[in-house]
Image (cartoon, coloured by chain):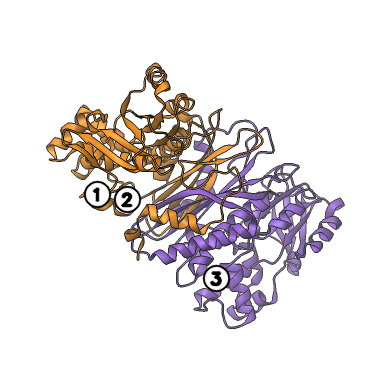
Chain colours: A orange, B purple
């Protein structure tokens, strides 16, 4: 069997199985970031790798955007734990023929994003490669004062909330596939391309939600995959009210032109880098007010139930979502078709 | 100008220039590992990336060796700061056509090496790639009780010591280029191939030396490049007595057969992953006794001087080494010819 047939999630399980169990207190593989306890508040640690041809193409993205996005997707993982990013290491594999100013622009983008999110670069590696460019970022951060917010912890009755909008990053990918280039020619195009090429990590939202939620994650792999992660623990399930999904006009219009269902883009498209959290009913009003105060839109999209699985309720009744498909980095080309 | 022409060291300077200065107390880009101070002892952090075609070829190395080496080279950086590795994140870019058992073997090697050095895997990333395999490891560790041992700190009069042997890893590379495959057919071949394919990080040596030395680094890029790093600070220089270089018989014999000077392999070959330290004369006997007690060979190879530059003394007199050449990942193919 090859890696494409196995898929990323099963590969991660395999990797997990081969490793010694982390020592007491460590929270390791399987959450947005690892938690490293210490006598003080400890650290969060996460890595995300962007690969030319899989995650980006030079015809689509300028090098400064690449640097900024590589930082943002890692900050998103720290934000999903309710933490604050502090220091970063970057490893870059690059072909010797690549022009120096392109690499400088990548690091300029990294510097700009680190400045935006309040972190600093402290190390990394630069190596030659015969293949495409690979940029791996490791971000270390401080956990929320009350400790890290995990994927585990949602309880039946909790409300499911999502920041911002879903499906827009996939819309941006569709535009790029159709030959539209940054920044597009309309406000709608620019908005979707921004979601795909220049996402914003929900750092402030993660911090203010940390003390109000039972569990949280970012929506990097599509809503359904992330709901399944939240539902992995403790025999719980997730029920989404499809009409409540935060899909903006730009995304809806593009999906309509493409003859596609924008809900599927929200469910399986990936790369939205919004936060998804399970909030106890007693805290839902405070969560709403707090997010409004910091100017971040959010939607209440469903509830946690005691029925295992991920379900959607729409005009057509209830259907199960988590057996339909899955975002898989190893078959992203298939999704693009 | 392209990246090959610029070279790795100038690229790192460029990256450094583009970033904000790390906050007070952080020791960032430019040492073996970054130091992250905290209210407790703080953390060390380092990343090293191995790229198919640049750092390894599948015809030369089995996947378990790759996993072990990726961990060892990172542990070597932690050891060079006098620290102890604790947790690790791994990012893997792999083509979808690669067989699952090959990837499992890489992670089995990672697990074996982590077990050997006392660290655990807590996270990372797995992504598809259209190119060759890329494995990036980030290792976090605890600094030595008295704080991290830096490259900066050597003083004129200090003795320069090196653990183990030099040039053997380059000898192993030469054997692989000549078609010899692991484990070779003689003890000498196996010894050189081990240095190249299965290096051991000098973790125990780093710990026991930490309180005895003024400065320390590992010899990953060849002795001359590392001496130049130690000499970068404070107008000091390094003088090596060529006859004292720890070059073993296997390396000397192979170099003779190749019509090459084994000293050059020690100076510029790279990948030896030994420790190089500047020891005050008052501590040199204790360093010798301590290393002997833990069974690690070491050689006193020269002295720190107040004459900037890296020099070698041999029968032919004194000559300057640090303007002769440099280990450069971007032109490693050239070195192999």
B97 vs A112, nearest the viewer = B97
A10 vs A204, nearest the viewer = A10
**Relative to B276, residue A250 above or below:** above
Q: Position of residue A229 (x, y in %)?
A: 39, 43
Q: Position of residue A67 (x, y in %)?
A: 41, 40
**Relative to B231, residue B264 above or below:** below
B153 vs B218, nearest the viewer = B218
Report the Cα–Cα distance between label 1 and label 3: 42 Å
Q: Is residue A99 visible?
A: yes
| In this rendering, position of residue B98 left or right of residue B229 | left
How many other residues sit within 10 Å of disc 1, few (<14), some (14-19) or many (≥20)? Answer: some
Q: What residue would you read off at disc 2?
A: A328
| The furthest residue to the front | A306
Name the chain letter of the residue that bears numbered label 2: A
**Label 1–label 2 contact, CB within 8 A:** yes
Q: Position of residue A282 (x, y in %)?
A: 42, 21
Residues at marks 1 and 2 on the same chain: yes
**Relative to B81, residue A300 above or below:** above
Quadrant (top left, top right, bottom left, bottom right) of the N terminus of chain A = bottom left
Q: Of helix, strand and loop, which one carries label 2?
A: loop
Q: What residue would you read off at disc 3?
A: B173
Q: What residue would you read off at disc 1?
A: A335
Q: Of helix, strand and loop, which one carries label 1?
A: helix
Q: Residue at x 39, y 44 (%)?
A: A102
Number of numbered callouts drawn: 3
Q: Residue at x 73, y 68 (%)?
A: B316
A98 vs A3, nearest the viewer = A3
């Amino acid at each position: 069997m090859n890696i494409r047939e196995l898929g990323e999630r099963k590969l991660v399980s395999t990797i997990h199985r081969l490793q010694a169990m982390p020592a007491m207190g460590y929270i390791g593989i399987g959450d947005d970031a690892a938690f490293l306890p210490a006598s003080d508040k400890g650290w969060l640690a996460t890595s995300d790798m962007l690969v030319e041809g899989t995650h980006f193409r030079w015809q689509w993205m300028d090098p400064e955007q690449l640097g900024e996005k590589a930082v943002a997707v890692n900050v998103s993982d720290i934000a999903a734990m309710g933490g604050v990013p502090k220091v970063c290491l970057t490893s870059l594999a690059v072909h010797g023929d690549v022009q120096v100013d392109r690499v400088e622009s990548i690091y300029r983008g990294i510097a700009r994003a680190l400045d935006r999110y309040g972190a600093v670069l402290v190390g990394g590696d630069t190596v030659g490669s015969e293949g495409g460019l690979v940029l791996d970022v490791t971000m270390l951060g401080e956990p929320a004062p009350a400790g890290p917010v995990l994927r585990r912890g949602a309880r039946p009755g909790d409300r499911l909330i999502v920041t911002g909008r879903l499906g827009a990053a996939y819309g941006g990918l569709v535009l790029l596939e159709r030959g539209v280039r940054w920044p597009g020619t309309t406000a709608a195009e620019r908005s979707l391309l921004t979601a795909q090429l220049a996402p914003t990590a929900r750092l402030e939202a993660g911090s203010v939600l940390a003390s109000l939620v039972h569990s949280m994650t970012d929506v990097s792999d599509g809503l359904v995959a992330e709901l399944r992660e939240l539902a992995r623990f403790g025999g719980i399930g997730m029920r989404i009210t499809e009409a409540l999904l935060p899909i903006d006009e730009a995304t809806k219009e593009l999906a309509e032109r493409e003859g596609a269902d924008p809900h599927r883009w929200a469910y399986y498209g990936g790369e939205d880098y919004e936060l998804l959290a399970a909030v106890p009913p007693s805290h839902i009003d405070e969560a709403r007010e707090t997010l409004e105060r910091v100017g971040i839109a959010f939607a209440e999209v469903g509830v946690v139930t005691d029925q295992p699985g991920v379900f959607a309720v729409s005009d057509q009744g209830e259907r199960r979502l988590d057996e339909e498909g899955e975002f898989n980095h190893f078959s992203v080309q298939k999704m693009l078709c």
